[in-house]
Image (tube, rainbow, N blue to C red):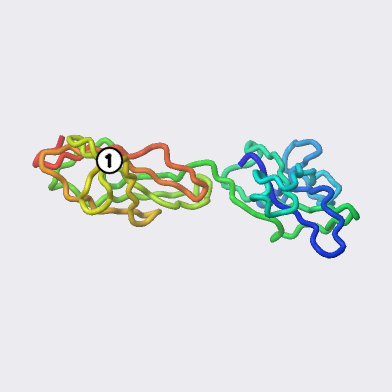
């Protein structure tokens, strides 16, 4: 998220054409706008369209790379470093186009104008309650896969899914998630649930060691970086 962007069109019978597009970014929680005059933070309360809260976006016309395949008359973009955001905070992006007449909406932006989003650059907190990391299990001690995932304290965009990867070390194959089939593809298999998740093991072969990894992802596409690693030996004794 290194830039914000959008489209502009001067429609109607008396259109004069787009001259410039101005954009502003608000920290919703603090109710302060980014100061584009000093670039010194979200410290502006005055939303005058000619004031410090607004800056010019870069315009492009009929550019298929920046104009959604040329569907709009004009597209605009504004570089905005991710270092200005705080994870877990909400931000509002508002844009105003001025035509060559020149007309521009000078009213203060409303809370529902533009787009509001949560900045989340951290993966969910992830835990396996079974199997436990680094442990070994025999068949008698094998329970359903289970665990938790939580994104509330690490960005807040919400847990989207949990997946597991189960490898048969003897065959050097991975569980497909369909029945008890294994193949050579690295198959991340979805489980049931998100914040509370579970999945039954497939049928395992006797005297075979299996290795399992697990991961979770959130709505901002962050993926947990600390997968669960457990060894499962389907015989009468733990590894």
Q: Position of residue 74 (x, y in %)?
A: 75, 50
Q: Who is closer to the viewer here, 62 or 211? A: 62
Asked if one can make out residue 124 in the rendered structure from this viewpoint, the answer is yes
Q: Residue furthest bottom?
A: 13
Question: Does 107 sit above or below residue 164?
Answer: below
Q: Residue at x 30, y 54 (%)?
A: 198
Q: Residue at x 26, y 53 (%)?
A: 178
Q: Residue furthest left?
A: 236
Q: Position of residue 106 (x, y in %)?
A: 85, 56
Q: Who is closer to the viewer here, 13 or 30? A: 13
Q: Residue at x 85, y 59 (%)?
A: 15
Q: Position of residue 164 (x, y in %)?
A: 32, 45
Q: Residue at x 82, y 44 (%)?
A: 52
232 sits left or right of 102 in the view: left
171 sits left or right of 145 in the view: left
Q: Tell me the SS state at disc 1.
A: strand
Q: Are there few (<14), some (14-19), or many (20+) residues within 10 Å of tag 1?
A: some
Q: How many marks?
A: 1
Q: Position of residue 238 (x, y in %)?
A: 14, 38
27 sits left or right of 230 in the view: right
Q: Which residue is mark 1?
A: 212
**Quadrant containing the C terminus in the rendered view:** top left
């Amino acid at each position: 998220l290194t830039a914000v962007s959008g489209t502009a069109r001067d429609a109607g019978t008396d259109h004069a054409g787009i001259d410039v597009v101005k954009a502003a970014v608000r920290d919703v929680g603090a109710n302060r706008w980014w100061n584009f005059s000093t670039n010194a933070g979200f410290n502006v309360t005055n939303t005058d369209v000619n004031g410090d809260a607004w800056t010019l976006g870069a315009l492009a016309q009929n550019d298929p790379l920046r104009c959604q395949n040329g569907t709009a008359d004009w597209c605009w973009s504004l570089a905005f470093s991710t270092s200005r955001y705080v994870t877990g905070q909400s931000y509002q992006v508002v844009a105003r186009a001025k035509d060559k007449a020149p007309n521009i909406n000078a009213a203060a932006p409303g809370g529902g104008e533009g787009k509001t989003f949560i900045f989340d650059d951290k993966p969910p907190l992830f835990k396996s309650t079974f199997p436990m990391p680094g442990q070994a299990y025999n068949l008698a001690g094998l329970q359903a896969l289970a665990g938790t995932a939580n994104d509330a304290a690490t960005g807040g965009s919400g847990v989207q899914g949990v997946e597991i990867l189960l490898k048969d070390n003897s065959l050097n194959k991975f569980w497909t998630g369909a029945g008890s089939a294994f193949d050579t593809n690295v198959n991340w298999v979805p489980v049931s649930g998100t914040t509370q998740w579970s999945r039954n093991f497939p049928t395992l072969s006797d005297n075979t060691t299996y290795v399992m990894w697990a991961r979770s992802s959130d709505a901002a596409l962050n993926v947990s970086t600390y997968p669960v690693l457990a060894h499962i030996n389907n015989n009468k004794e733990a590894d």
